[in-house]
Image (cartoon, grey):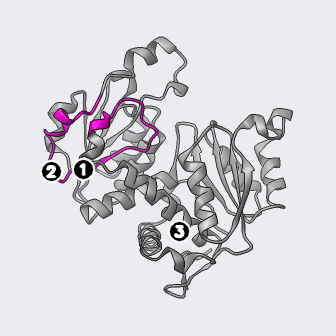
Amino acid sequence: MRHLIDSLDLSVAETREILDLADRMAADPTAYAHCADGKILATLFYEPSTRTRLSFETAMLNLGGKTLGFAGAEQCSATKGETVADTARVVSCYADIIAMRHPKEGAPLRASMYSKIPVINAGDGGHNHPTQTMIDLLTIRQRKGHLDHLKVGFCGDLKFGRTVHSLVNSLVRYPENEFYFISPEELKVPDYLIEDTLKPAKALYHEVTSLEDTLPELDVLYMTRVQKERFFNEEDYIRLKDIYILDQEKLNLAKPDMPVLHPLPRVDEIATEVDNDPRAAYFQQVLNGKYIRMALILSLLGLTDPVTGKKVLSC
């Protein structure tokens, strides 16, 4: 049995296989419409989500399976004091696979230690968001044709942005990628990401504050919102929330084929006028979310790909 708690749980080769499977699903979704007949996905979401929860549910429904679960901690037995471990044990009796989002780092990992069925981390605190990472990799590969030799800029909340941390961890595994971290001092990328990920990989990286000066250098731009829910001080949030806003004038400084990614939801860090620019890739990411999660569900359940006649992962 395999779980997906961290994007590094998948090797580079396995990651490529999942991305290839997602592309096949996008090209011919009807071929996969009954792969998970009779299977049940439990979505255990202890904090709010729109895209992630709905795309997991849509993914399972598109595979022919069913879903159950809750969309807030107040809707489950956590309000009565039930532990994540016990919830995992209980839900293992009802479902075939779990997708869990939790505000506490490490909660999905703990659930996987007690679950009898595969657990997918759908985001834990400011730590990790592996399925979003897979979505981001797929979108970058579709736009650029490869995942190596890229100059990738991350802009905004790099301190609490779990999508940023996960994606950097994955992209350092591909040769000659260079990273630009664009943020104010208060939201700069955590030291552990530099010390534990970038330096051991001998990856080139730059910590800068100017979006305008950096844009012409980039092959990919990853925007993030300043996350109000991660702040302890509302005054700090108000001071920093509008520090970076990508509008059409700024985007005109970038390369004509530089995709703009964003995990969503956005607040005002990307002006709506950018939506009509062909470089805007964030709604493509949303669509890719369905196919990536379909691919992961099929693979972690150990089901056979009807197109190739093979299983993707060795579970």
Q: Quadrant of the C terminus?
A: bottom right
Q: What distance separates the C-alpha of mark 1 from that of mark 2?
A: 7 Å
Tell me the SS state at disc 2: loop
Identified by mark 2, the residue type is Pro
Q: Residues within 10 Å of mark 2 (few under 14, many from 20)?
A: few
Residue 258 in the image, given as x and y percentages of width and height? 21, 50
Residue 108 in the image, given as x and y percentages of width and height? 66, 48
Identified by mark 3, the residue type is Ala
Tell me the SS state at disc 1: loop
Residue 298 in the image, given as x and y percentages of width and height? 59, 71
Tell me the SS state at disc 3: helix
Check disc 3 and report the residue beneath it. 295
In contact (CB < 8 Å): disc 1 and disc 2 = yes
Number of numbered callouts drawn: 3
Q: Which residues are magenta?
A: 245-273
Check disc 2 and report the residue beneath it. 256
Q: What distance separates the C-alpha of mark 3 from that of mark 1?
A: 26 Å
Q: Is residue 249 magenta?
A: yes
Check disc 1 and report the residue beneath it. 279
Q: Residues within 10 Å of mark 1 (few under 14, many from 20)?
A: many
Q: Report the magenta stretch's main SS.
A: loop
